Image (cartoon, rainbow, N blue to C red):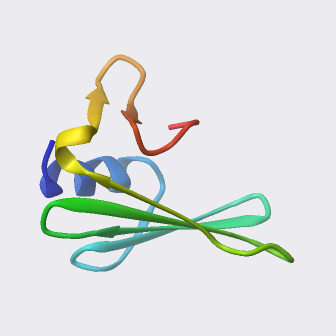
């Protein structure tokens, strides 16, 4: 797993690019932000009336499942 793979996945899954390494998507009543770092990814999930949930994973701890299109280890619903 690397930054390019995550960026490609984000673009293919409805995330809009805010700059080279930050992607954002709005789902129902939440906002998801992916910040791609040098060796990791930070996911920030924000819902109205709730505290933001921040998840961080190293690339080495993530896998891309090509069949399901999910980034395993970061998003539960892909």
Q: Residue at (23%, 60%) from the top-left corner?
A: 40
Q: Quadrant of residue 73?
A: top left
- Decide if residue 48 is on the left or right side of residue 58: right
Above or below, 34 relative to 4: below
Q: What residue is drawn where x is 42% and y is 21%?
A: 68
Q: Position of residue 46 (x, y in %)?
A: 67, 71
Position of 20 relative to 67 (above/below): below
- In percent of width and height, residue 27 lies at 68, 58
Instruction: Residue at the far right: name it.
Output: 49
In x, y percent, where is residue 13?
Answer: 44, 48
Q: Which residue lies furthest to the top in this view?
A: 67
Image mark count: 0
Query: Does 2 appear above or below 54?
Result: above
Q: Nearer the viewer, residue 52 or 36?
A: 52
Q: Which residue is drawn at 35% across and 17% down?
A: 67
- The residue located at (15%, 41%) in the rendering is 1
Residue 7 vertical position relative to residue 49 in the rendered view, above or below? above
Q: In this view, does 13 lie to the left or right of 35?
A: right
Along the line of sight, the residue nearer the viewer: 14 or 22: 22
Locate residue 64, reporting x and y percent.
Answer: 28, 31
Q: Observer-nearest residue: 65 or 38?
A: 38
On the rendered structure, is 77 left or right of 19?
A: right
């Amino acid at each position: 797993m690397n930054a390019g793979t995550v960026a490609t996945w984000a673009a293919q899954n409805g995330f809009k690019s805010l700059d080279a390494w930050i992607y954002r998507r709005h789902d129902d009543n939440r906002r998801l932000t992916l910040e791609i770092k040098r060796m990791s990814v930070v996911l920030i999930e924000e819902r109205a009336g709730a505290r933001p949930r921040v998840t961080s994973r190293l690339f080495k701890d993530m896998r891309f499942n090509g069949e399901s299109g999910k980034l395993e280890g970061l998003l539960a619903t892909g």
